[in-house]
Image (tube, helix red, strand yellow):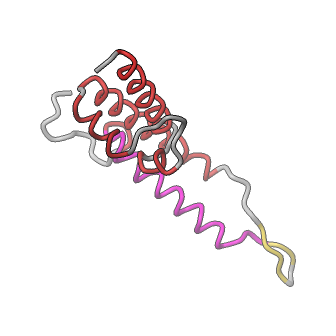
Amino acid sequence: MSGDDRTTRARIIEEVCERIAGGESVAQCFADPGDGYCSEKTFWRWIGADKGLLALYEVAISVRGLYYGEKVSSFGFAKPERIATAFGTRIDPGWVQLQKIKSDDCKWIAARMAPKKYGDRTILAGDAD
């Protein structure tokens, strides 16, 4: 493999990992690929063949967990949407449910991506730390 191929591969992997760290999934990254992206299948093959690239991907996954963990608090502080009624306005119960679903989804993702920080268990089985 030439040096240019390695540089291109590293650039693509870094761009995808940056997007992953910002909350996107690999599938989302390749549904709207950047310039000169490879296929999703090629991305997985590259990750599987290079421990350094795999480590970069694993860091991006952990950071994505932190991203979603921090995002949870934004739902609690959002100004509620209101609906008009015959007696004035009130908080829209559909909006409240949507915020709850978003919060629960973010908590679930954070617990899976960053289990040491956001997981339910305080001690992970077999973990030396």
Query: Where is residue 94, by image quadrant?
Result: bottom right
For residue 43, above or below residue 11: below
For residue 120, above or below residue 67: below
Query: Residue lying farthest left?
Result: 126
Q: Is residue 114 magenta?
A: yes
Residue 52: image x %, image y %? 28, 23
What residue is shown at x 61% (from left), y 52% (from top)?
Answer: 76
Residue 79: image x %, image y %? 73, 55
For residue 102, above or below residue 4: below
What residue is shown at x 86% (from left), y 84% (from top)?
Answer: 86
Dominant SS type (magenta) = helix
What residue is shown at x 31% (from left), y 48% (from top)?
Answer: 120
Residue 126: image x %, image y %? 12, 37
Q: Nearer the viewer, residue 122 or 17?
A: 17
What residue is shown at x 32% (from left), y 40% (from top)?
Answer: 42
Q: Nearer the viewer, residue 73 or 5?
A: 5
Please indicate whether residue 40 sits to the left or right of residue 49 in the image: right
Please indicate whether residue 43 sits to the left or right of residue 126 in the image: right
* Residue stretch rendered in magenta on the structure: 90-115
